[in-house]
Amino acid sequence: MSEKPATDEEDTRYRSVVDNVIDGIITIDETGRIESFNPAASSIFGYANDEVIGHNVKC
């Protein structure tokens, strides 16, 4: 299955939702590296975004 690239408007809408929900959302890539960490996740886990982005969830 081929995925089409997100438009800027779709990306903005996605970020707006993820950044404003009360649930912690963490996205990881196929190797387990954290790609995004929303503000709720930061509050729940006590880590700032820049402390976790790029780190592996297994370590």
Image: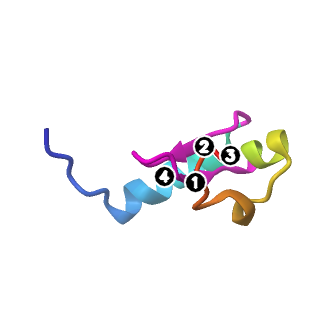
- Magenta region: 22-39
* Proximity of marks 1 and 2: CB atoms separated by less than 8 Å: yes
Q: Is residue 12 left or right of residue 54?
A: left
Q: Which residue corresponds to mark 1?
A: 36
Q: Position of residue 3 (x, y in %)?
A: 20, 47
Distance from the alpha carbon under mark 3 to that under mark 1: 14 Å
Q: What's the residue type where badge 2 is placed?
A: Ile
Render colour scheme: rainbow
Q: Which mark is residue 44?
A: none
Q: Which residue corresponds to mark 4?
A: 13
Q: Position of residue 55 (x, y in %)?
A: 61, 57
Q: Which of the two labelled residues, at mark 3 and mark 1, occupies the earlier sequence position?
A: 3
Q: Which mark is residue 26?
A: 2
Which one is in front, 9 or 29?
29
Crowding at dot 3, Cα within 10 Å, few <14 / some 14-19 / many 20+, comes out as: few
Figure quadrant of residue 7: bottom left
Q: Secondary structure at mark 4?
A: helix
Q: Which of the two labelled residues, at mark 2 and mark 3, occupies the earlier sequence position?
A: 3
Q: Position of residue 33 (x, y in %)?
A: 52, 52
Q: Which of the two labelled residues, at mark 3 and mark 4, occupies the earlier sequence position?
A: 4
Nearest to viewer (mark 1 / mark 4):
1
* Proximity of marks 2 and 3: CB atoms separated by less than 8 Å: no
